[in-house]
Image (tube, rainbow, N blue to C red):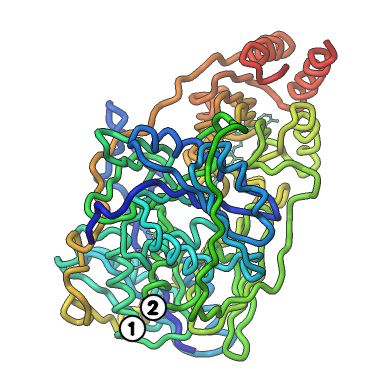
Amino acid sequence: MKILVLVKQVPDTTDVKFNENGVMIREGLQSILNMFDQFALEEALRIREMYGGEVSVMTLAPEQAKTAMQKCLALGADKAYHISDRAFGGSDTLATSYALSLAVQKTGPYDIIFAGNQATDGDTGHIGPQVAEWMKIPHTSYVERVEKIENGTITVKSLLEDGYRMIEMKLPALVACIPPPNFEYSNPSMSGIIKAKNKPYIWMKADDIDGDKSKFGLNGSPTRVVKMYPPPKRERGQIFTGDYSESVRKIIEHLKEKKVIE
Amino acid sequence: MNIDEYRGILVVGEVYDGKVRPVTYQLISKAREMASSLNTKLSAVLMGNNISQYANDMIAYGADTAYIMEDKVLESYVSELYASVLARFIESIKPEIVLIPATHTGREYGPRIAAYLQTGMTADCTDLQIRNGKFIQIRPAYGGNIMGEIITPNHRPQIATVRPNVFKVGNYDKQRKGETVKVKPDMSNINIRTMIKDIVKTTVTGTKKVDEARVVVSGGRGIGSKEGFSILQDLADLLGGAVGASRVAVELGWMPKSAQVGQSGLTVAPDLYIAVGISGTIQHIVGMKDSKIIIAINKDPNAPIFNIADFGIVGDYREIIPIFIEELKKELKK
Ligand SMILES: Cc1cc2nc3c(=O)[nH]c(=O)nc-3n(C[C@H](O)[C@H](O)[C@H](O)COP(=O)(O)OP(=O)(O)OC[C@H]3O[C@@H](n4cnc5c(N)ncnc54)[C@H](O)[C@@H]3O)c2cc1C
Ligand SMILES: Nc1ncnc2c1ncn2[C@@H]1O[C@H](COP(=O)(O)O)[C@@H](O)[C@H]1O
């Protein structure tokens, strides 16, 4: 079983600071492995445990993403592909997925490709489905668990808003993963960290993946971000600390005025 | 690509459990405004089986053309199938803008369509604007800490997925004139390698869906137990609403995942959101901050949820909610 996990290093947005104008301060944010991707990796490692094989990780990112890649190796991935080139600067999801799909084809073939359902920075959830589309392979998003692999198929549990579906796909296929509510993330062990240093770490440049260079980077990106600003703020309203009945009655009065209760 | 060939707006509707998802009509209503300011036509498409009865509703909400694509095979949704069929259809009618619901399904097949058509796509928009004839797509990023405005200047169509409930349904005009067009879905040479083995619903039948309810009463860690949620259910029932939860409440097994509101759960924007025993971390807030009225009940006066609440009561929910129910009953009897 040859398995690939697409991973991304992201700023830790759970601990964001703002300047006096309410603008998020991006400097000094910790970089972490996208949590959805760590879950995807741990699913991949579980599959390797059950069925044997090899798990590689791949990222398309500047050099500093090596930290997240090393973490993947320390957690148990066998090999890392790090695609890094100025040519990819300014890529949107279409250009990123195109370059990734080329690198996947170049380093593959793989039986299963894992991705996170979304990355917590851009939060688009595009890359998984789009890599699958460029490669013309089936894919499923919102995958909370891989159930089994059997006779060249993979069965996954995919979340709906009000439940889930069990879906079987012919391999090769891509699964975009979302961690279940009580998932416990592993920490790399000391021996894992040491072993990681000797695992293959392969750097790739734009020239190492064959493709249409006009579709790389900013030139290959149909979308443009034209403006960024802090989200509209809600004002703090009336907070009651006194008698409950009185507070409740005041609130109900307001709900009546606003016709929420009629 | 000659971008002038692309005209009009297309809304992709969704049928779910045999019914049209409300977001379909929300998007048609919003797109109606956009089409008027762009002085262009609005069409909407629905895929599935036995769905032609919905064409009139799409027109009544504002579509000039309602496309109906029916086939037995389209009855159950599979991403590679829907993506291919829709992409081919979009190619044939060449709209300048395509809006897709940011549901789990829409976020699954949508990006594939954009890659198929090699055009730009903006995920999970919370606002859309037409400014000087340009289509501006507005969305949160970085866990809701930043808003970004995105354009697709030189590619067509410009595709966006749009969150449910950020736009309200507009006027339903039974008299509105429009055209219904039945389209034969192009499924030639599509090799479907995906099979649905089972569908399981975790919401209790008969209860309201959190993402569709007008009132949501949500509980968090502060509820303290699974049993604690029953009083929230009582309050929700009284208000004709649904019960939601923070991630912690889901992790503790008190509520199903399908009730989770927030960054890794549902985005809701009801008329009234009551947060009970929820501290109000950014990951929860991004999922509910567009609610019209927010009420927070929390025993910690410094809980961040109070900073975005229109009304708050500091105290123990075990005492407050019964009073709320009591007073509401009096009110509703009047
Ligand atoms: C990548 C990522 C994604 C996430 N996605 C989500 C998401 O989608 N949704 C989500 O909700 N969270 C999400 N989280 C988790 C989030 O960071 C918080 O952990 C979570 O929202 C906290 O839930 P809570 O408010 O119920 O619990 P707590 O933060 O523990 O708050 C409990 C509150 O209850 C109050 N309380 C206690 N007892 C009582 C009482 N008797 N009466 C009244 N008040 C009481 C306390 O004062 C406290 O404020 C995510 C986190 C990450 C890292
Ligand atoms: N630059 C990248 N390199 C490798 N994988 C990526 C990259 N960007 C996104 N991904 C993968 O695609 C998933 C979804 O990301 P996104 O579409 O950005 O929300 C992530 O969880 C990763 O698995």
Q: Position of residue A256 (x, y in %)?
A: 68, 13
Q: Within the image, what quadrant is residue B143 found in?
A: top left
Asked if the residues shown at circle 1 and circle 2 are in contact, with their CB atoms under 8 angstroms apart, the answer is yes
Secondary structure found at label 2? helix
Relative vertical location of residue B87 with respect to residue B22 in this rendering, above or below: below
Q: On what subunit does the disc labeled 2 rest?
A: A
User: Is any atom of residue A261 visible in this view?
Assistant: yes
Q: Is residue B319 left or right of residue B113?
A: right
Residue at the location (48% across, 39% down)? B286
| Tag 1 residue | A105
Q: Position of residue B310 (x, y in %)?
A: 55, 19
Residue at the location (48% across, 42% down)? B64
Q: Within the image, what quadrant is residue B224 found in?
A: top right
Q: Is mark 1 within 8 Å of ligand 2?
A: no
Going by the numbered disc 2, the residue's amino acid type is: Met
Secondary structure found at label 1? helix
Q: Is residue A223 left or right of residue B317?
A: left
Q: Residue furthest right?
A: B333
Q: On what subunit does the disc labeled 1 rest?
A: A
- Could you give the CA–CA distance between mark 1 and mark 2, rounded to whole angstroms? 8 Å
Going by the numbered disc 1, the residue's amino acid type is: Gln
Q: Position of residue B326 (x, y in %)?
A: 82, 18
Determine which of the numbered discs, if any, sits on residue A135 in the image.
2
State which quarter of the image contains the C terminus of chain A: top right
